[in-house]
Image: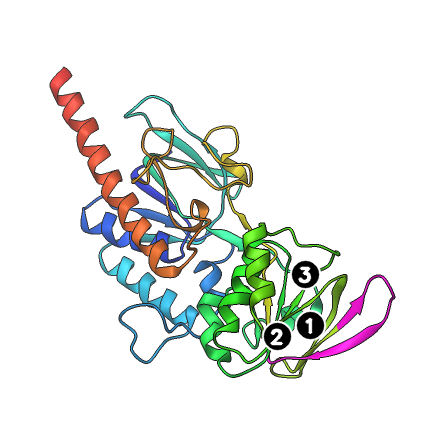
Amino acid sequence: MERHDCIIIGTGPAGYTAAIYAARADLKPVIYTGLEPGGQLTTTTEVENFPGYPEGITGPAMMEDLKKQAERFGTDVRFGMITKAEFSKTPGEYHKLTVDETTEVLAKTVIIATGATAKYLGLDSEKRLMGHGVSACAICDGFFFKGQEVVVVGAGDSAAEEATYLAKLCPKVTLLVRKDHFKASKIMEERVHKTSNIEVMLNTETVEVLGEKTVSGVRVKNNQTGEESTVAAEGFFVAIGHKPNTDIFKGQLDMDETGYLIAKAGTASTNMPGVFATGDAQDKIYRQAITAAGSGCMGALEAERYLQEVEEEVEASA
């Protein structure tokens, strides 16, 4: 069975940044890509808010750059899915990971960078226009819709935040709420109602996102009357939440009620020795490429220090 000092699970900004730092520390990291190499950024057509790219860059191209940089320092990038994790509670002992339900590997440290998956409505038209007017991140993509009319779907705090953010850039924001009330906190709901260029449509569901190559409108239905209508829009933002990709760690790692991993304050350390949580798997607040990269750096630095401490304890007891 293969034994490694450091295995990284996931290849978004957090995973690749962790790999760069771990490789430079001579930990000889192995990184498993998961089913979606590059993570959520691979569905983003243009990234303009990541430092170092003055002209902007596509999400897939940026992830390829990070991959090449990680490989340059000796990272072993492997296409595969970690399907099971068995963590040891004893400091210094190996953790066991299963790849694609068949192969087992051992690691002294594990850096989790499995990210989160945005929830979508599941419409064919939504999938077809993903990255061409359909987005799940207003902060990431809102700038591209400056001066244009957009639609936001959702009823919680995230939807309210995205709608008010977009209202600063767009002349009109239509917020579609499926029920007759918000799920958002009262203060966020009041903020929406006080924003003059946000129109709220209650009891409204999305039937289809319209457009051939880019979004041109949204066909909606009032679920009380059954009446259908079309909302003119050039952007369609889905804000119905994210699901962290952490199911395989349930019962072992501390997480909140929605599945986000809980790291010790100011660190990437989990409740298991030698296991570190980074990126969107533990961040439900910022969810940006730059913050994910920063936490990946933290995870790698802490893994290096952990291995050093374990080695010093072994030497002291020898």
Residue assigned mark 3: 121
| Horizontal and vertical percent position of residue 14 | 36, 53
Quadrant for residue 8, please give it.
top left
Mark 3 or mark 2, whichever is nearer to me? 3
Q: Residue 129 carries which label?
A: 2
Decide if residue 137 is in sight here: yes
Cα separation, mark 3 vs mark 1, equals: 10 Å
Give whichever of discs 3 and 2 has the lower sequence position. Answer: 3
Indicate the amino acid at tag 2. Leu
How dense is the environment of label 2, judged by Cα within 10 Å: few (below 14), some, or many (20 and up)? Answer: some
Colour scheme employed for the rendering of this structure = rainbow
Magenta region, residue range? 220-235
The secondary element bearing badge 1 is classed as helix
Name which residue lies at 39% across and 71% down.
61
Name which residue lies at 75% across and 64% down.
205
| Horizontal and vertical percent position of residue 190 | 58, 58
Decide if residue 318 is in sight here: no
Residue assigned mark 1: 125
Quadrant for residue 101, please give it.
top right
Q: Is residue 198 above or below residue 29?
A: below
Cα separation, mark 3 vs mark 2, equals: 13 Å
Judge from the rendering whether residue 22 lies leftward or rightward of residue 176; answer left or right: left
Name which residue lies at 46% across and 58% down.
39
